[in-house]
Image (spheres, rainbow, N blue to C red):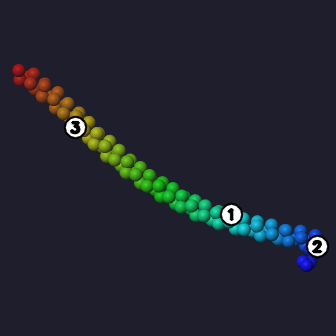
């Protein structure tokens, strides 16, 4: 016949079982937190790498804009010179006629 368990011992056994359950749940949550932490680290690294790529491309675009601006400026200078030459040729043509 099983020995009779005192109410105090029964409560202590229930507390022990609850603690085991909670410990298992906490361990599982710890594993989940570690996994999520690793994923966040990966996302942060990818974000930083993306920022570096965007900054690098932005620098390249700024240089291209500067190059185009300089090209347009030189073309405008050429146009002004051509307009001046056309004006002078017109004056000479009028004098020659």
Q: Are marks 2 and 3 in contact (CB under 8 Å)?
A: no
Q: Which residue is labeled 2 in the image? A: 6
Instruction: Depth check: give the residue in front, 6 or 42.
Output: 6
Query: Along the horizontal axis of the image, is 48 left or right of 69?
Result: right
Q: Which is nearer the N-term, disc 2 or disc 3?
A: 2
Residue 95 percent coordinates (x, y): 8, 22
Tell me the number on the disc at residue 29: 1
Q: Is mark 3 on a helix, strand or loop?
A: helix
Query: Along the horizontal axis of the image, is 44 left or right of 52?
Result: right
Q: Eyeballing the image, is 51 above or below 72? A: below
Neighbour tally class for label 1: few under 14, some 14-19, many 20 plus, Cα within 10 Å: few
Q: Are marks 3 and 1 in contact (CB under 8 Å)?
A: no
Neighbour tally class for label 3: few under 14, some 14-19, many 20 plus, Cα within 10 Å: few
Q: Which is nearer the N-term, disc 2 or disc 1?
A: 2
Residue 17 percent coordinates (x, y): 80, 69
Q: Which is nearer the N-term, disc 3 or disc 1?
A: 1
Badge nearest the viewer, 3 or 1: 1
Q: Which residue is labeled 3 in the image? A: 78
Q: How far apart are marks 3 and 1 (CA)?
A: 72 Å
Q: What element carries label 1?
A: helix
Q: Distance between the residues labelled 2 and 3?
A: 107 Å
Neighbour tally class for label 2: few under 14, some 14-19, many 20 plus, Cα within 10 Å: few
Q: From the image, which quarter does the C terminus lie in?
A: top left
């Amino acid at each position: 016949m099983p020995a009779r368990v005192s109410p105090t011992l029964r409560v202590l056994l229930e507390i022990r079982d609850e603690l085991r359950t909670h410990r298992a749940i906490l361990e599982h949550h710890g594993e989940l937190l570690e996994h999520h932490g690793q994923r966040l680290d990966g996302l942060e690294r990818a974000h930083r790498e993306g920022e570096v790529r965007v900054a690098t491309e932005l620098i390249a675009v700024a240089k291209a804009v500067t190059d185009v601006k300089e090209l347009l400026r030189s073309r405008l200078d050429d146009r002004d010179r051509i307009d001046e030459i056309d004006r002078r040729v017109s004056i000479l043509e009028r004098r020659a006629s």
